[in-house]
Amino acid sequence: MSITSYIMSTDNRFESKKRKKPATTRSLEFLSPKTRKMAVEFLQECEKSNLKVIITCTYRSQEEQNRLWQQGRDSNGKKIGPTVTNVKGGKSRHNDEDKQGNPASTAFDICPLTDSGKEDWNSKYWNTFGIIGRRIGLEWGGDWISFVDKPHFQLNDKDREEELKTCVN
Ligand SMILES: [Zn+2]
């Protein structure tokens, strides 16, 4: 072992450069910088339109993604009940990380709230949220055909590629 790698393996000042990866979080700090900026803009636009909303998920670890994928499937991956996701760990935009391996999700999920602040999954405003997200330049899961995912917003492919090439979180 070289001296440098020995020091790095024992000195927690180096360790601390790597952020802890939460299994799942709704904190905006785990979004990539560009996604975070757009999420803030999204929340501001919703507020201007008097729409109450919360962010329910930003980053999710690969392990957590795999755990979700396993729900409703047997050990061979065969569907045996209702499933919650079609993608395995590492394939979801929620699993995105920067070059250093720090969480840098390029997607976030929302849930509309009622006036009294309760989660409102049957909200009649889903499409309005979609319009707001699109206007900001986000891709909306409600526009997808094969797997409609109304709570989901993400960077478009081009923005994501650029962002993950350069961003440091
Ligand atoms: Zn999502």
Image (cartoon, rainbow, N blue to C red):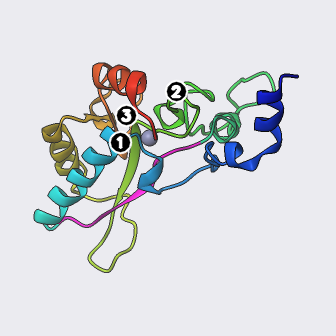
Residue 14 placed where, x, y %?
Answer: 68, 42
Residue 122 placed where, x, y %?
Answer: 34, 58
Residue 114 lies in the magenta-colored region: no
Residues under numbered marks 2 and 1 in contact, where contact means CB atoms less than 8 Å apart: no
Residue 104 placed where, x, y %?
Answer: 47, 38
* View extreme (front): residue: 3
Q: CA distance from mark 2 to mark 1?
A: 13 Å
Name the residue type under label 2: Lys
Residue pointed to by mark 3:
148
Residue pointed to by mark 1:
33
Q: CA distance from mark 3 to mark 1?
A: 26 Å
- Asked if 62 appears above or below 1 in the picture, the reply is below
Name the residue type under label 1: Pro
Q: Quadrant of residue 45?
A: bottom left
* View extreme (bottom): residue: 116
Residue 99 - label = 2
Name the residue type under label 3: Val
Q: Disc 1, ligand 1: is the CB inside 8 Å? A: no
Q: Quadrant of residue 33?
A: top left
Q: Quadrant of residue 89?
A: top right
Q: CA distance from mark 3 to mark 2?
A: 30 Å
Name the secondary structure under disc 3: loop
- Foreground mark, 3 or 2, reads 2
